[in-house]
Image: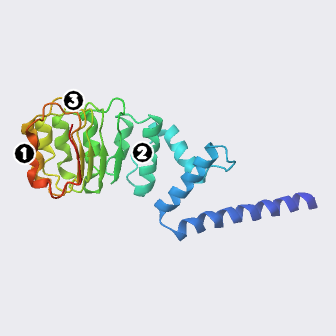
Amino acid sequence: MGGACSRKRDQQVSEDNLHRGVSGRYSKSASSKWLGTSFSRGADAKQGKGKCPSLMELCIHRVCEDIDKYSTFSVLPRDISQQIFDELVCLQRLTDVSLEAFRDCALQDLNMGEYPGLNDCWMDVISSQGSSLLSLDLSGSDVTDPGLTNLKDCKNLQALNLNYCDQITDCGVENISGLTNLTTVSFRRNNTLTAQGMSALSGLINLVKLDLERCPKIHGGMVHLKGLFFSLMVLHYL
């Protein structure tokens, strides 16, 4: 009997320490920093260093497993919904249906390069992040010119990757010409852009890096970018 009571007290002490430890870590720093620390510990565990996954990592993994059960993550803190989104992309479990749960979540970074099935149907939810969206990678996707029109309200977008997007033409470049906060734009290996399309980039006054590598039809288009040469720090054009 005494042994059972002793075990019960030890269990209670362990549980109290666990609760104090979690709440203490969370209150000492921003949630995003705490999440980053938690995930690094989880990564260490995967590398065989013997550390257990964090509670947050386990929760996010479970949410990803049961993703079809959730209709929206808009009520969650942005950094948590961002972690769920990133994990789904990493696991390639994100679909056009499950993507709907991220509508109006104010996500900042949507890194979806080479993601299978990504097309114009996804752009409505992507653009619903609005002014919160800072970085968008659509490389290797089937997004077309009309799909890019959805980005018009993402006024704070700073980085846009459209590498290997052969369905983006000069009209698509025109559709992003109003996103004047863009600092990095990449069209690498696009076989449809022409010199005429380069004129639409001339209004991107904050552009620092422009990648036009292996875009064979833009010869002569650099003349349209002469007004940006003072701000451009990196220009790939071969």
Q: Which coloring applies here? A: rainbow
Which-is-in-front pick, marks 2 and 3? 3
First-in-chain label (2 vs 3): 2
Q: Quadrant of the N terminus?
A: bottom right
Distance between mark 1 and mark 2 Cα atoms: 40 Å
Residue 85: mark in rendering? 2
- The foreground one among 44 and 226 is 226
- Three-letter residue code for mark 3: Asp
Q: Is 73 drawn above or below residue 68 in the view shown?
A: below
Q: How many numbered badges does the structure rendering display?
A: 3
Residue 105 location (% of width, % of height): 35, 52
Q: Image check: 27 left or right of 170?
A: right
Residue 176 location (% of width, % of height): 16, 46
Query: Which residue appears at 19% of the width and 41% of the height?
Result: 148
Residue 161 location (% of width, % of height): 28, 42
Distance between mark 2 and mark 3 Cα atoms: 26 Å
Which-is-in-front pick, marks 1 and 2? 1
Which-is-in-front pick, marks 3 and 1? 1
- The foreground one among 63 and 180 is 180
Q: Quadrant of the C terminus?
A: top left
- The foreground one among 164 and 145 is 164
Query: Which residue appears at 34% of the width and 53% of the height?
Result: 108
Q: Image check: 200 left or right of 89?
A: left
Outermost residue on the bottom side: it is 28
Residue 18 location (% of width, % of height): 68, 62
Query: Which residue appears at 30% of the width and 46% of the height?
Result: 136
First-in-chain label (3 vs 1): 3
Please give the residue where the numbered disc 3 appears in the rendered image.
Answer: 166
Mark 1 falls on what kind of element?
A: helix
- Disc 1, disc 2: CB below 8 Å? no
Please give the residue where the numbered disc 1 appears in the rendered image.
Answer: 223
